[in-house]
Image: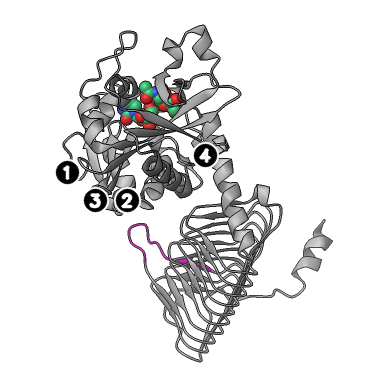
């Protein structure tokens, strides 16, 4: 099939200039690792079976990060240059016909639209290869594009090998190419190690093909920001900032109100409905979903949170892997984690922690409480300072609280605990036995008043 599009992503390098133990493509920007962004862009032009990533450093982790896409992997155990990396894919099924697009795993801002433009240009120009180039005011560090009299690419010269005149060229190699597969593989096999560095340069195929009258055409892209490759943590932060800006802009255009968007951090896969509001310094991480009309208060951090409609999250609240149903209110300073569920119109106040706990419809826990491994019914009132003692040092135990129960302030519920429907627990109780439905459970020392004791003590002095 002549029109098959395959994509190879070069992602084997460590990235020495990151000064990190972590392989470069595993660093994160915009809420996903660098390679994830590139794979997503690749998926818009090729089927998973036609996408191959060349991996090397921390290959297992890299593979695990993007495993969900179903793409192929090829191992480059020693990193001997971009030409060597691509050569690892020679003979891979699916890569020997049609066109092969080469992308770099450390170039995550590249858009689907630009890859489409590359494919269209390649089609129209009808030559052996097309390379994306751009003009940079500071081209230092990049391969320079040397053009021939007809405007074709005569050679790509690396910074280290460039002479003074070539160093003045401002048109640079993005590292993004489209090749005719039938020409790429035979010419790539002819690339020899660069005498200075000992590396196999993919860019050398340009001159090798040209010697046989097979040409490479440049596609100049004006907006260089998409071509930004990450080499240092400074560039990582810059790219992260661009992703954050793209995401908040996209949400605002879809009707989300964002106050001081430059302070708000939203990961790639987050969804928020129209007329939801994000106050300053909010972070929405992972697969968080925000329903219509919900307000996320300043400085709250939500990770994999599912928020219904008309929910109020007051400032400084932390929510992870938990759910707030329609009309719920939580915070300020609340913490919900590990599968907490706050049902419709239930309220959680300040300094209340819920762990793996369901709080039923219309129930309230307004101040200073820890509710762990509990199932709490509807219209329950949890008094200030209530603690579920869910851990005995070895195992976790459950607490069940029936509909309409009233747990007095500063109660200690020793799990496994059962508080029956419509029952009361007296304030300050330590509950170690089940409280039956509609009963009053009192578990505390009895108060004794000694008449005149204080006056007598004063008189002694
Ligand atoms: C390369 C280009 C340069 C271009 C620049 C654009 C060559 C020789 N040079 O230089 O013309 O301007 O990109 O950013 O191609 N990789 C491997 N295995 C290896 C070597 C590299 O997988 O053995 C991967 C890296 O992980 C990275 C990509 O290839 O994702 C680019 O490698 P890098 O070393 O950063 O190339 P540059 O020196 O930047
Ligand atoms: Ca690079």
Residue 13 appearing in the image: no
Residue placed farthest to the front in the image? Answer: 150
Among numbered discs 1 and 3, the one appearing first in the sequence: 3
Residue at 52% x, 37% y: name it: 221
Q: CA distance from mark 2 to mark 1?
A: 14 Å
* Residue 49, label in figure: 3
Q: CA distance from mark 1 to mark 4?
A: 30 Å
Q: Which residue is mark 4?
A: 226
Q: Which residue is mark 1?
A: 93
Residue 15: quarter of image: top left
The segment highlighted magenta reads 387-396
Viewer-proximal residue among 251 and 141: 141
Residue 246 appearing in the image: yes
Residue at 44% x, 72% y: name it: 374
Q: CA distance from mark 2 to mark 3?
A: 8 Å
| Mark 1 neighbour density, 10 Å: few (under 14) some (14–19) many (20 or more) | few
Secondary structure beneath label 2: loop
Q: Which residue is mark 2?
A: 46
- CB atoms at circles 3 and 4 under 8 Å apart? no
Judge left or right: residue 145 versus residue 188: right
């Amino acid at each position: 099939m002549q029109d098959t599009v395959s994509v190879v992503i070069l992602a084997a390098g460590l990235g020495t200039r990151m000064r990190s133990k972590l392989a470069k493509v595993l660093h994160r920007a915009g809420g996903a690792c660098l390679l994830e962004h590139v794979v997503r862009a690749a998926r818009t032009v090729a089927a998973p079976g036609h996408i191959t990533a060349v991996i090397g450093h921390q290959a297992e982790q890299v593979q695990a990060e993007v495993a969900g896409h179903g793409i192929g992997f090829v191992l480059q155990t020693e990193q001997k240059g971009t030409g060597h990396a691509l050569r690892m894919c020679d003979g891979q099924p699916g890569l020997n016909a049609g066109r092969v697009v080469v992308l770099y795993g450390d170039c995550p801002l590249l858009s689907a639209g630009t890859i489409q433009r590359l494919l269209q240009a390649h089609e129209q120009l009808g030559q052996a290869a097309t390379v994306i180039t751009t003009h940079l005011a500071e081209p230092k560090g990049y391969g320079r594009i040397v053009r021939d009299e007809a405007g074709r690419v005569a050679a790509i010269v690396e910074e280290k090998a460039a002479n003074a005149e070539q160093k003045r060229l401002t048109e640079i190699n993005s590292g993004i190419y489209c090749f005719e597969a039938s020409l790429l593989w035979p010419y790539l096999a002819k690339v020899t190690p660069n005498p200075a560095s000992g590396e196999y340069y993919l860019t050398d195929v340009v001159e090798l093909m040209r010697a046989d009258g097979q040409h490479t055409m440049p596609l100049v892209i004006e907006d260089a920001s998409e071509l930004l490759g990450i080499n240092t943590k400074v560039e990582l932060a810059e790219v992260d900032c661009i992703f954050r800006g793209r995401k908040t802009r996209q949400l605002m255009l879809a009707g989300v109100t964002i106050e001081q968007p430059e302070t708000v951090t939203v990961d790639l896969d987050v969804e928020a409905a129209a007329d939801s509001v994000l106050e300053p310094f909010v972070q929405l991480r992972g697969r968080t979903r925000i329903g219509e009309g919900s307000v996320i208060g300043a400085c709250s951090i939500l990770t994999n949170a599912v928020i219904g409609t008309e929910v109020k999250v007051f400032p400084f609240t932390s929510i992870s892997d938990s759910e707030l149903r329609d009309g719920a209110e939580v915070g300020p300073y609340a913490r919900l984690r590990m599968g907490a569920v706050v049902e419709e119109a239930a309220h959680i106040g300040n300094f209340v922690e819920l762990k793996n706990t369901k709080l039923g419809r219309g129930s309230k826990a307004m101040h200073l409480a820890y509710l762990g491994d509990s199932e709490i019914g509807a219209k329950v009132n949890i008094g200030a300072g209530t603690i579920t003692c869910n851990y005995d040092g070895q195992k976790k135990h459950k607490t069940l609280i029936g509909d309409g129960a009233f747990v007095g302030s500063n109660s200690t519920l020793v799990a496994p605990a059962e508080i029956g429907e419509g029952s009361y627990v007296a304030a300050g109780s330590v509950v170690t036995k089940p409280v039956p439905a509609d009963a009053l459970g009192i578990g505390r020392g009895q108060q004794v008043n000694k008449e005149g004791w204080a006056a007598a003590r004063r008189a002694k002095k």
